[in-house]
Amino acid sequence: MAITTFLAPRDGAEPSRGEFFLAPRSFFWWPLDGQRHAANIQDRELPNGEPISTLCDQDLTRAPAGDTEWLWPTCQGCWDATAARVGLR
Ligand SMILES: [Zn+2]
């Protein structure tokens, strides 16, 4: 309702599909070594066992992520870095 109104063009024309989405993110989240960290999107497809450079400046080994791992706490350093990237800080 309010969101649709906000996203609709002022002239009332049907917005293109792209106008409903934010710019692609430059990072992704992944559970690593007991916390949910963020890393540059270029590393998203790295295989398990490869090092991932996190936005909190750690090199951590990628491991499979199941339901339990996604419940790990969020790394504050990565949270701060991603908040800055998306303009929240
Ligand atoms: Zn981190």
Image: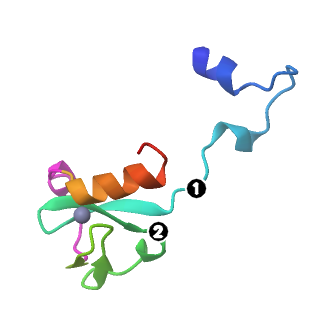
Q: What type is the residue that disc 1 sits on?
A: Pro
Observer-nearest of 58 and 84: 84
Please, what secondary structure does the residue beneath circle 2 have? Answer: helix
Q: Are marks 2 and 1 in contact (CB under 8 Å)?
A: yes
- Tag of residue 24: 1
Query: Crowding at label 2, few (<14), some or many (≥20) Cα neighbours within 10 Å?
Result: few
Q: Which residue bears the numbered disc 2?
A: 41
Residue 55 seen: yes
Q: Quadrant of residue 3?
A: top right
Q: Position of residue 63 (x, y in %)?
A: 22, 74
Q: Which residue is painted at 39% across and 55% down in the image?
A: 82
Observer-nearest of 37 and 66: 37
Magenta stretch containing residue 76, yes or no?
Answer: no
- Tag of residue 79: none
Ligand 1 within 8 A of label 1's CB?
A: no
Q: Position of residue 78 (x, y in %)?
A: 29, 59
Region rendered in magenta: 62-73
